[in-house]
Image (spheres, grey):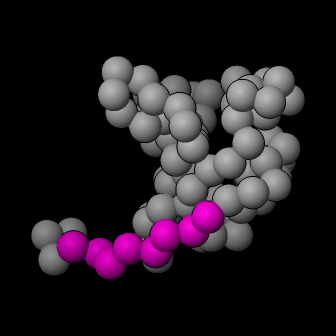
Amino acid sequence: MAKERVKSGILDQAHVVGCKGEYTVVLNGMDWNGEPLVLSSSRKPYEARIFKSLDGAIAELLRIGLTEASIKITAKSDND
């Protein structure tokens, strides 16, 4: 689904957000019921896809056709 949105020009940027071993891809400018949309897998379409590395997240963005992304590295909370 994301690949079609990139091809049609609806989606052109994303953010990779997270900490070591727990990165998610947030799609720019796309909301669902007030929440930002995140990249998910076809097997679990209602759960955010978690990437173990930045390389994996960026490779997936390239696979769907995105060429612009920002990266925000966050600190793990003490509760984890």
- 14 vs 59, left or right, is left
Q: Quadrant of residue 78?
A: bottom left
Residue 50: x percent and y percent?
50, 53
**Total numbered labels placed on residues in the image:** 0
Q: Nearer the viewer, residue 67 or 25?
A: 67
> Vertically, is 8 above or below 6?
above
Q: Which residues are magenta?
A: 70-77
* Residue 8 relative to residue 12: left or right: right
Where's the N terminus, which quadrant? top right
**What percent of the width, then of the height, locates residue 59?**
77, 59
Residue 42's spot in the image, x, y percent?
A: 62, 28
Residue located at (36% from left, 33% from top): 35
Whether residue 44 is visible to the viewer of this picture, yes or no, is: no
**Residue drawn where x is 44% and y is 66% of the image:** 18
Residue at the location (21% across, 73% down)? 77
* Residue 35 visible in the shown view: yes
Residue 22 placement (x, y as % from top left):
45, 64
Vertical arrangement, residue 2 with respect to residue 77, above or below:
above
The residue positioned 48% from the left and 62% from the top of the image is 17
Classify 39 as above or below 14: above
Quadrant (top left, top right, bottom left, bottom right) of the C terminus: bottom left
Q: Find out whether residue 38 is within the magenta segment.
A: no
